[in-house]
Amino acid sequence: MRALPVRRRLLTSAVTLLLVGGVAGSAAADAPAWRPSQAAAASVHVPDGVTAGAAVFDRQTGTFTEQLNTSARFRSASVVKVLLALDFLWNRGPDYTVPAADRALLEPMLRSSNDQAASHYWSTNGGSAIINRMADRLGLSDTAPPPAGYEGYWGYTSLSARDTVTIYRYLLDKAPGPVRDFVMGNLRQSTRCASDRFDQHFGIAGAFEKPWAVKQGWAGSSYEEGTCGTGAAASRTSVQAQAPASAPRSAPAAADVDLTRPALHSTGTVGAGDRFIVAVFTLHPVGTSYGRAYTDIGRLTRSLHVPGAARPAGWWYGTWSDHVNVRPDPSTSNSAITQLPAGVEVLVGCQRKGQEVSVPPYTNDWWAYLPQYGGWISNIYISSPDNKIPDVKEC
Protein backbone atom coordinates (compact mmCIF):
# COMPACT_ATOMS: atom_id res chain seq x y z
CA MET A 1 0.00 0.00 0.00
CA ARG A 2 1.37 3.42 -0.89
CA ALA A 3 2.08 5.88 1.87
CA LEU A 4 -0.39 8.75 1.99
CA PRO A 5 0.70 12.36 2.50
CA VAL A 6 -0.34 13.84 5.86
CA ARG A 7 -3.26 15.72 4.31
CA ARG A 8 -4.61 12.63 2.63
CA ARG A 9 -4.11 10.46 5.74
CA LEU A 10 -6.25 12.88 7.74
CA LEU A 11 -8.97 12.78 5.12
CA THR A 12 -9.03 9.05 4.55
CA SER A 13 -11.37 8.01 7.35
CA ALA A 14 -13.91 10.70 6.63
CA VAL A 15 -13.71 10.22 2.88
CA THR A 16 -14.22 6.48 3.07
CA LEU A 17 -17.50 7.06 4.89
CA LEU A 18 -18.63 9.41 2.13
CA LEU A 19 -17.77 7.28 -0.88
CA VAL A 20 -20.91 6.05 -2.61
CA GLY A 21 -21.14 4.32 -5.97
CA GLY A 22 -22.09 6.84 -8.65
CA VAL A 23 -24.82 6.13 -11.16
CA ALA A 24 -23.41 5.90 -14.66
CA GLY A 25 -23.27 9.16 -16.53
CA SER A 26 -24.13 11.34 -13.54
CA ALA A 27 -22.04 13.89 -11.66
CA ALA A 28 -22.09 16.41 -8.87
CA ALA A 29 -20.29 19.43 -10.25
CA ASP A 30 -19.04 20.46 -6.84
CA ALA A 31 -17.81 16.99 -5.80
CA PRO A 32 -14.24 16.94 -4.42
CA ALA A 33 -11.66 15.29 -6.68
CA TRP A 34 -11.50 12.21 -4.45
CA ARG A 35 -15.24 11.65 -4.37
CA PRO A 36 -17.17 9.77 -7.07
CA SER A 37 -19.86 11.69 -8.90
CA GLN A 38 -23.36 11.43 -7.53
CA ALA A 39 -26.80 11.27 -9.14
CA ALA A 40 -27.54 13.94 -11.72
CA ALA A 41 -29.47 17.00 -10.65
CA ALA A 42 -32.98 17.61 -12.00
CA SER A 43 -31.81 20.68 -13.94
CA VAL A 44 -28.68 21.81 -15.72
CA HIS A 45 -25.72 22.06 -13.35
CA VAL A 46 -23.21 24.62 -14.57
CA PRO A 47 -19.78 24.26 -12.87
CA ASP A 48 -18.36 27.30 -11.10
CA GLY A 49 -16.72 29.80 -13.43
CA VAL A 50 -18.33 28.35 -16.56
CA THR A 51 -20.64 30.32 -18.85
CA ALA A 52 -23.00 28.03 -20.73
CA GLY A 53 -25.84 27.82 -23.21
CA ALA A 54 -27.62 24.49 -23.67
CA ALA A 55 -30.67 22.95 -25.28
CA VAL A 56 -32.14 19.46 -25.59
CA PHE A 57 -34.88 18.98 -28.18
CA ASP A 58 -37.00 15.82 -28.29
CA ARG A 59 -37.90 15.15 -31.93
CA GLN A 60 -40.45 12.54 -30.88
CA THR A 61 -42.58 14.96 -28.86
CA GLY A 62 -41.52 18.15 -30.65
CA THR A 63 -40.60 19.82 -27.35
CA PHE A 64 -37.53 21.02 -25.49
CA THR A 65 -36.66 19.02 -22.40
CA GLU A 66 -33.89 21.43 -21.42
CA GLN A 67 -33.24 25.09 -22.18
CA LEU A 68 -30.48 27.26 -20.71
CA ASN A 69 -29.47 30.60 -22.22
CA THR A 70 -30.48 29.22 -25.61
CA SER A 71 -30.12 32.54 -27.46
CA ALA A 72 -26.70 33.37 -25.98
CA ARG A 73 -24.14 33.71 -28.77
CA PHE A 74 -20.80 31.89 -28.58
CA ARG A 75 -17.92 31.79 -31.00
CA SER A 76 -18.52 28.52 -32.75
CA ALA A 77 -14.99 27.13 -32.97
CA SER A 78 -15.31 23.95 -35.08
CA VAL A 79 -19.09 23.56 -34.80
CA VAL A 80 -19.29 25.90 -37.81
CA LYS A 81 -17.93 23.06 -39.93
CA VAL A 82 -21.45 21.64 -40.14
CA LEU A 83 -22.53 24.82 -41.91
CA LEU A 84 -19.50 24.67 -44.22
CA ALA A 85 -20.49 21.14 -45.24
CA LEU A 86 -24.15 22.07 -45.74
CA ASP A 87 -23.22 25.06 -47.87
CA PHE A 88 -21.04 22.87 -50.09
CA LEU A 89 -23.82 20.30 -50.48
CA TRP A 90 -26.59 22.83 -51.13
CA ASN A 91 -28.33 22.34 -54.50
CA ARG A 92 -25.87 19.74 -55.74
CA GLY A 93 -28.77 17.49 -56.81
CA PRO A 94 -30.33 15.44 -58.11
CA ASP A 95 -28.15 12.73 -56.54
CA TYR A 96 -25.91 15.05 -54.47
CA THR A 97 -22.80 13.15 -55.47
CA VAL A 98 -19.73 14.23 -53.53
CA PRO A 99 -16.60 14.15 -55.73
CA ALA A 100 -13.78 12.00 -54.40
CA ALA A 101 -11.51 15.03 -53.89
CA ASP A 102 -14.14 16.74 -51.75
CA ARG A 103 -15.00 13.56 -49.88
CA ALA A 104 -11.33 13.35 -48.88
CA LEU A 105 -11.69 16.78 -47.26
CA LEU A 106 -15.25 16.73 -45.94
CA GLU A 107 -15.04 13.38 -44.18
CA PRO A 108 -12.07 14.29 -41.93
CA MET A 109 -13.55 17.75 -41.43
CA LEU A 110 -16.74 16.25 -39.99
CA ARG A 111 -15.30 13.17 -38.30
CA SER A 112 -11.98 14.50 -37.02
CA SER A 113 -12.55 18.27 -37.10
CA ASN A 114 -9.82 18.86 -39.67
CA ASP A 115 -8.95 22.58 -39.74
CA GLN A 116 -7.19 22.60 -43.10
CA ALA A 117 -10.34 21.28 -44.79
CA ALA A 118 -12.44 23.98 -43.12
CA SER A 119 -10.02 26.68 -44.24
CA HIS A 120 -10.19 25.33 -47.81
CA TYR A 121 -13.99 25.60 -48.00
CA TRP A 122 -14.00 28.92 -46.18
CA SER A 123 -11.64 30.53 -48.69
CA THR A 124 -13.07 28.75 -51.76
CA ASN A 125 -16.75 29.37 -51.13
CA GLY A 126 -16.82 32.96 -49.94
CA GLY A 127 -15.87 33.06 -46.27
CA SER A 128 -18.39 35.15 -44.38
CA ALA A 129 -20.83 34.91 -47.27
CA ILE A 130 -21.23 31.22 -46.41
CA ILE A 131 -22.58 32.15 -42.98
CA ASN A 132 -24.95 34.77 -44.37
CA ARG A 133 -26.28 32.30 -46.94
CA MET A 134 -26.83 29.53 -44.42
CA ALA A 135 -28.41 31.85 -41.86
CA ASP A 136 -30.93 32.97 -44.49
CA ARG A 137 -31.58 29.46 -45.79
CA LEU A 138 -32.18 27.93 -42.37
CA GLY A 139 -33.70 30.92 -40.60
CA LEU A 140 -30.99 31.22 -37.97
CA SER A 141 -31.60 34.04 -35.49
CA ASP A 142 -28.28 34.33 -33.66
CA THR A 143 -25.76 33.16 -36.25
CA ALA A 144 -23.39 35.77 -37.70
CA PRO A 145 -20.06 35.86 -39.55
CA PRO A 146 -16.78 36.73 -37.82
CA PRO A 147 -16.48 40.43 -36.85
CA ALA A 148 -15.05 43.00 -39.25
CA GLY A 149 -11.29 42.74 -39.46
CA TYR A 150 -11.31 39.04 -38.54
CA GLU A 151 -13.02 37.58 -41.58
CA GLY A 152 -10.41 34.83 -41.89
CA TYR A 153 -11.31 33.38 -38.50
CA TRP A 154 -14.05 30.93 -39.41
CA GLY A 155 -14.08 29.80 -35.76
CA TYR A 156 -15.26 33.31 -34.78
CA THR A 157 -18.63 32.67 -36.43
CA SER A 158 -21.25 33.11 -33.73
CA LEU A 159 -23.77 30.38 -32.91
CA SER A 160 -26.34 29.78 -30.19
CA ALA A 161 -27.85 26.62 -28.73
CA ARG A 162 -31.25 27.31 -30.31
CA ASP A 163 -29.73 27.93 -33.76
CA THR A 164 -27.77 24.72 -33.43
CA VAL A 165 -30.99 22.82 -32.74
CA THR A 166 -32.46 24.44 -35.87
CA ILE A 167 -29.47 23.29 -37.94
CA TYR A 168 -29.83 19.68 -36.80
CA ARG A 169 -33.62 19.77 -37.26
CA TYR A 170 -33.05 20.85 -40.86
CA LEU A 171 -30.51 18.07 -41.37
CA LEU A 172 -32.77 15.38 -39.93
CA ASP A 173 -36.21 16.48 -41.09
CA LYS A 174 -35.84 18.63 -44.21
CA ALA A 175 -32.51 18.04 -45.93
CA PRO A 176 -32.42 15.78 -48.98
CA GLY A 177 -31.73 12.18 -48.00
CA PRO A 178 -28.19 12.07 -49.46
CA VAL A 179 -27.26 15.27 -47.61
CA ARG A 180 -28.65 13.98 -44.32
CA ASP A 181 -26.96 10.62 -44.72
CA PHE A 182 -23.60 12.11 -45.65
CA VAL A 183 -23.38 14.64 -42.83
CA MET A 184 -24.98 12.56 -40.08
CA GLY A 185 -23.18 9.42 -41.22
CA ASN A 186 -19.84 11.15 -40.76
CA LEU A 187 -20.81 12.65 -37.39
CA ARG A 188 -21.70 9.15 -36.21
CA GLN A 189 -18.11 8.17 -37.02
CA SER A 190 -16.51 10.89 -34.90
CA THR A 191 -12.96 9.83 -34.03
CA ARG A 192 -11.67 10.08 -30.47
CA CYS A 193 -8.48 11.76 -31.68
CA ALA A 194 -9.12 14.85 -33.77
CA SER A 195 -6.84 15.80 -36.65
CA ASP A 196 -4.95 18.14 -34.32
CA ARG A 197 -4.54 15.23 -31.87
CA PHE A 198 -6.95 16.52 -29.24
CA ASP A 199 -9.31 14.12 -27.48
CA GLN A 200 -12.73 15.19 -28.79
CA HIS A 201 -14.97 12.65 -27.06
CA PHE A 202 -16.13 15.01 -24.35
CA GLY A 203 -19.67 16.19 -23.63
CA ILE A 204 -22.23 14.10 -25.52
CA ALA A 205 -19.74 11.39 -26.46
CA GLY A 206 -18.82 10.80 -22.82
CA ALA A 207 -22.23 11.34 -21.21
CA PHE A 208 -24.29 8.92 -23.30
CA GLU A 209 -24.04 5.46 -24.77
CA LYS A 210 -24.27 5.09 -28.53
CA PRO A 211 -26.08 5.68 -30.80
CA TRP A 212 -24.97 9.27 -30.94
CA ALA A 213 -23.59 11.64 -33.57
CA VAL A 214 -21.41 14.59 -32.58
CA LYS A 215 -19.71 17.71 -33.87
CA GLN A 216 -17.50 19.27 -31.25
CA GLY A 217 -15.70 22.58 -30.97
CA TRP A 218 -12.74 23.87 -28.96
CA ALA A 219 -10.56 26.96 -28.97
CA GLY A 220 -8.19 28.38 -26.39
CA SER A 221 -4.49 29.11 -26.06
CA SER A 222 -4.44 27.27 -22.70
CA TYR A 223 -5.53 24.01 -24.35
CA GLU A 224 -2.03 22.67 -24.89
CA GLU A 225 -2.33 19.41 -22.93
CA GLY A 226 -5.30 17.83 -24.65
CA THR A 227 -3.34 15.30 -26.64
CA CYS A 228 -4.67 11.83 -27.34
CA GLY A 229 -3.13 8.92 -29.14
CA THR A 230 0.58 8.48 -28.57
CA GLY A 231 3.61 10.28 -29.88
CA ALA A 232 4.03 14.01 -30.42
CA ALA A 233 1.98 16.43 -28.36
CA ALA A 234 -1.10 18.00 -29.83
CA SER A 235 -0.78 21.22 -31.71
CA ARG A 236 -2.07 24.36 -30.05
CA THR A 237 -5.73 25.14 -30.65
CA SER A 238 -5.59 28.87 -30.16
CA VAL A 239 -7.78 30.97 -32.41
CA GLN A 240 -4.70 31.93 -34.42
CA ALA A 241 -4.75 28.42 -35.90
CA GLN A 242 -8.12 29.20 -37.46
CA ALA A 243 -6.97 32.25 -39.39
CA PRO A 244 -4.56 33.06 -42.21
CA ALA A 245 -1.03 33.97 -41.16
CA SER A 246 -1.67 37.61 -42.04
CA ALA A 247 -4.60 37.94 -39.63
CA PRO A 248 -4.17 39.85 -36.35
CA ARG A 249 -2.78 37.74 -33.52
CA SER A 250 -5.56 38.65 -31.10
CA ALA A 251 -9.06 40.02 -31.33
CA PRO A 252 -11.18 42.10 -29.01
CA ALA A 253 -14.59 40.85 -27.95
CA ALA A 254 -17.16 41.60 -30.65
CA ALA A 255 -20.47 42.87 -29.32
CA ASP A 256 -21.90 40.14 -27.09
CA VAL A 257 -19.61 37.36 -28.35
CA ASP A 258 -16.67 36.54 -26.07
CA LEU A 259 -13.57 35.85 -28.18
CA THR A 260 -11.18 35.57 -25.26
CA ARG A 261 -12.10 32.79 -22.84
CA PRO A 262 -11.37 29.16 -23.76
CA ALA A 263 -14.36 27.52 -25.45
CA LEU A 264 -15.50 23.91 -25.46
CA HIS A 265 -18.72 22.89 -27.23
CA SER A 266 -20.55 19.60 -27.80
CA THR A 267 -23.40 19.29 -30.30
CA GLY A 268 -25.23 16.47 -32.04
CA THR A 269 -27.87 13.82 -31.48
CA VAL A 270 -28.51 11.11 -28.90
CA GLY A 271 -30.63 7.97 -29.03
CA ALA A 272 -32.17 5.66 -31.60
CA GLY A 273 -33.43 7.50 -34.66
CA ASP A 274 -31.57 10.63 -33.55
CA ARG A 275 -34.44 11.27 -31.13
CA PHE A 276 -32.72 14.01 -29.10
CA ILE A 277 -30.84 16.99 -30.46
CA VAL A 278 -28.33 18.25 -27.89
CA ALA A 279 -26.37 21.50 -28.00
CA VAL A 280 -23.95 22.53 -25.26
CA PHE A 281 -21.78 25.65 -25.53
CA THR A 282 -19.33 26.56 -22.77
CA LEU A 283 -16.74 29.22 -21.95
CA HIS A 284 -14.15 28.69 -19.22
CA PRO A 285 -11.93 31.01 -17.18
CA VAL A 286 -8.76 32.18 -18.93
CA GLY A 287 -5.97 29.69 -18.28
CA THR A 288 -8.27 26.69 -17.80
CA SER A 289 -6.56 23.46 -18.82
CA TYR A 290 -8.09 21.18 -21.43
CA GLY A 291 -8.60 18.42 -18.85
CA ARG A 292 -10.47 20.80 -16.51
CA ALA A 293 -12.70 22.13 -19.30
CA TYR A 294 -13.26 18.56 -20.58
CA THR A 295 -14.37 17.54 -17.07
CA ASP A 296 -16.65 20.55 -16.61
CA ILE A 297 -18.50 20.17 -19.91
CA GLY A 298 -18.85 16.46 -19.13
CA ARG A 299 -20.47 17.19 -15.78
CA LEU A 300 -22.80 19.75 -17.32
CA THR A 301 -23.82 17.41 -20.15
CA ARG A 302 -24.46 14.52 -17.77
CA SER A 303 -26.87 16.74 -15.81
CA LEU A 304 -29.08 17.38 -18.86
CA HIS A 305 -32.60 15.96 -18.90
CA VAL A 306 -32.57 13.51 -21.82
CA PRO A 307 -35.43 11.09 -21.01
CA GLY A 308 -34.56 7.44 -21.53
CA ALA A 309 -31.12 8.06 -23.02
CA ALA A 310 -28.67 5.29 -22.15
CA ARG A 311 -25.94 6.32 -19.72
CA PRO A 312 -22.61 4.48 -19.48
CA ALA A 313 -22.18 2.26 -16.41
CA GLY A 314 -19.40 2.98 -13.96
CA TRP A 315 -18.00 5.54 -11.52
CA TRP A 316 -16.60 8.96 -12.41
CA TYR A 317 -13.24 9.84 -10.86
CA GLY A 318 -10.67 12.56 -11.28
CA THR A 319 -7.10 11.82 -12.37
CA TRP A 320 -3.79 13.58 -11.85
CA SER A 321 -0.46 13.89 -13.70
CA ASP A 322 0.26 14.72 -17.34
CA HIS A 323 0.12 12.29 -20.26
CA VAL A 324 -1.23 9.31 -18.30
CA ASN A 325 -0.97 6.25 -20.55
CA VAL A 326 -4.02 4.09 -21.18
CA ARG A 327 -2.77 0.52 -21.59
CA PRO A 328 -4.36 -2.52 -23.32
CA ASP A 329 -3.91 -4.59 -20.13
CA PRO A 330 -3.11 -3.83 -16.46
CA SER A 331 0.63 -3.58 -16.98
CA THR A 332 3.25 -1.39 -18.62
CA SER A 333 4.47 -4.24 -20.84
CA ASN A 334 2.56 -3.22 -23.97
CA SER A 335 2.49 0.10 -25.78
CA ALA A 336 -0.10 2.65 -24.72
CA ILE A 337 -3.39 2.88 -26.59
CA THR A 338 -3.68 6.60 -25.96
CA GLN A 339 -3.00 9.26 -23.34
CA LEU A 340 -5.42 11.16 -21.11
CA PRO A 341 -5.78 14.93 -21.11
CA ALA A 342 -4.06 16.16 -17.95
CA GLY A 343 -6.32 16.03 -14.89
CA VAL A 344 -9.41 14.81 -16.74
CA GLU A 345 -12.29 13.01 -15.04
CA VAL A 346 -12.76 9.45 -16.33
CA LEU A 347 -15.39 6.73 -16.10
CA VAL A 348 -14.09 3.68 -14.21
CA GLY A 349 -15.87 0.45 -15.09
CA CYS A 350 -14.09 -1.91 -12.69
CA GLN A 351 -10.66 -2.58 -11.16
CA ARG A 352 -8.23 -5.45 -10.71
CA LYS A 353 -4.71 -6.17 -9.55
CA GLY A 354 -1.91 -6.07 -12.08
CA GLN A 355 1.69 -4.96 -12.39
CA GLU A 356 2.93 -2.81 -9.53
CA VAL A 357 3.58 0.78 -10.57
CA SER A 358 5.84 3.15 -8.65
CA VAL A 359 5.67 6.94 -8.72
CA PRO A 360 7.66 7.85 -5.59
CA PRO A 361 6.58 8.07 -2.88
CA TYR A 362 3.62 5.96 -4.11
CA THR A 363 3.36 2.35 -5.28
CA ASN A 364 0.18 0.61 -6.41
CA ASP A 365 -0.67 -2.73 -8.04
CA TRP A 366 -4.37 -1.97 -8.66
CA TRP A 367 -5.54 -0.89 -12.10
CA ALA A 368 -8.75 0.79 -13.28
CA TYR A 369 -10.52 -0.23 -16.47
CA LEU A 370 -11.80 2.72 -18.52
CA PRO A 371 -14.59 1.40 -20.79
CA GLN A 372 -14.77 4.59 -22.83
CA TYR A 373 -11.10 4.20 -23.76
CA GLY A 374 -11.06 0.41 -23.94
CA GLY A 375 -8.00 0.22 -21.72
CA TRP A 376 -6.43 0.48 -18.27
CA ILE A 377 -4.65 3.04 -16.13
CA SER A 378 -2.83 2.45 -12.87
CA ASN A 379 -4.91 3.39 -9.83
CA ILE A 380 -1.91 5.43 -8.77
CA TYR A 381 -3.27 8.14 -11.09
CA ILE A 382 -6.84 8.00 -9.76
CA SER A 383 -7.79 10.66 -7.21
CA SER A 384 -8.87 8.20 -4.52
CA PRO A 385 -7.85 7.87 -0.83
CA ASP A 386 -6.52 4.32 -1.15
CA ASN A 387 -4.83 1.97 -3.60
CA LYS A 388 -8.07 0.07 -4.20
CA ILE A 389 -10.90 2.44 -5.05
CA PRO A 390 -13.42 1.81 -2.24
CA ASP A 391 -16.70 1.74 -4.21
CA VAL A 392 -15.62 0.30 -7.58
CA LYS A 393 -16.30 -3.36 -8.29
CA GLU A 394 -13.52 -5.82 -9.18
CA CYS A 395 -13.26 -6.99 -12.76
Image (cartoon, rainbow, N blue to C red):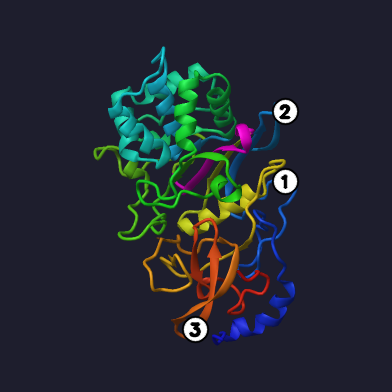
Disc 3 residue type (three-letter): Thr
Residue 2, by quadrant, is bottom right
Camera-near label (2 vs 1) is 2
Is 70 placed above or below 38 here?
above
Residue most extreme to the top: 94
Q: Do the CB atoms of the residues marked 3 and 2 lie less than 8 Å apart? A: no
Q: Residue at x 67, y 43 (%)?
A: 309
The magenta-colored residue range is: 260-275
Apparent side of residue 181 relative to residue 242 in the rendered image (left or right): right
Camera-near label (1 vs 3) is 3
Q: Quadrant of the C terminus?
A: bottom right
Q: 203 or 281: nearer the eye?
A: 203
Residue 61: mark = 2
Which residue lies under the disc numbered 1?
A: 43
Q: Secondary structure at mark 1?
A: loop
- Residue 156 position, x and y percent, is 42, 36
Which residue lies under the disc numbered 3?
A: 363
Count neighbours of disc 2 (C-alpha within 10 A) and say few if under 14, some if 14 to 19, many if 20 or more. few
Count neighbours of disc 3 (C-alpha within 10 A) and say few if under 14, some if 14 to 19, many if 20 or more. some
Q: Secondary structure at mark 2?
A: loop
| Cα distance in 3D space between marks 3 and 2 | 53 Å
Disc 2 residue type (three-letter): Thr
Q: Quadrant of the N terminus?
A: bottom right
Disc 1 residue type (three-letter): Ser
